[in-house]
């Protein structure tokens, strides 16, 4: 399998700066772009689910910030993966732990390598 092309959202810039305040914002966006490109996720259904989650957060008084947007983005992605049986909550938690262990054991300045 070859890596996908970087989508326009990941290349976007604002005032010469990256469009993403945090690395994980770009990563979660890239995961969704790959799932849509590989027809594993319907773009219209994704958009509807994300809009509903943002509406819910807004109704609860969440501020209109990048952090609110990307945490909603991540929540919807986790829900979609779980419902589609692509990855359950335990799988996501285990993978998150694997990444945490990998970056904590990686010397500063070296690329993080996830094994297995």
Image (cartoon, helix red, strand yellow):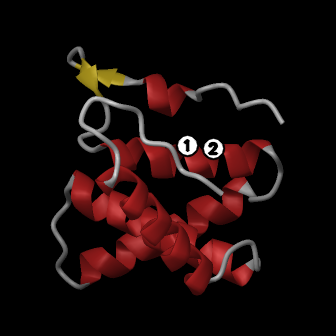
Q: Can you see residue 1?
A: yes
Name the mark on residue 30.
1
Q: In which quarter of the image is the N terminus?
A: top right
Q: Residue at x 35, y 51 (%)?
A: 103
Q: Residue furthest top?
A: 16
* 61 versus 106 height, above or below: below
Label 1 Cα crowd, 10 Å radius (few <14 / some 14-19 / many 20+): some
Whole-Å distance between the Cαs marked 2 and 1? 5 Å
Please name the residue that numbered disc 2 is placed on: 33
In the depicted structure, whether residue 111 falls above or below residue 28:
above
Using the image as rendered, state which of residue 13 and residue 51 is in the foreground: 13
| Image spot of residue 19 (x, y percent) | 31, 32
Q: Report the side of 50 relative to 40 (left or right).
A: left
Q: Label 1's element?
A: helix
| Residue 68 x/y as whole percent | 26, 64
Q: Is the Cβ of the residue at disc 2 closer than 8 Å to that at disc 1?
A: yes
Between 87 and 102, the residue placed more toward the observer is 102
Q: Residues within 10 Å of mark 2 (few under 14, many from 20)?
A: many
Q: In this view, does 74 lie to the left or right of 18?
A: right
Locate residue 97: give its quadrant: bottom left
Q: In which quarter of the image is residue 108?
A: top left
Location of residue 83 in the rendering, given as x and y in whole percent from the top left corner: 70, 83
User: How many dots with numbers?
Assistant: 2
Name the quadrant of the C terminus: bottom right
Residue ID at (45%, 23%): 11
Does residue 51 appear in this view? no
17 vs 29: above or below: above
Residue 113 in the figure: left or right of residue 22: right
Q: Is residue 52 above or below residue 101?
A: below
Closer-to-camera residue (87/45): 87
Residue name at image x 47 percent, y 46 percent: 27
> Residue 24's x, y, as percent?
37, 49
């Amino acid at each position: 399998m070859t890596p996908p092309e970087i989508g326009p959202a990941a290349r976007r810039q604002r005032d010469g700066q990256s469009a993403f305040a945090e690395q994980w914002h770009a990563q979660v966006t890239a995961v969704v772009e790959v799932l849509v490109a590989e027809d594993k996720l319907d773009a219209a259904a994704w958009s509807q689910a994300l809009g509903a989650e943002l509406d819910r957060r807004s109704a609860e008084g969440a501020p209109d910030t990048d952090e609110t947007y990307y945490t909603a983005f991540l929540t919807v992605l986790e829900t979609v993966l779980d419902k589609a049986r692509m990855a359950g909550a335990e799988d996501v938690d285990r993978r998150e732990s694997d990444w945490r262990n990998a970056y904590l054991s990686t010397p500063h300045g070296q690329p993080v390598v996830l094994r297995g």
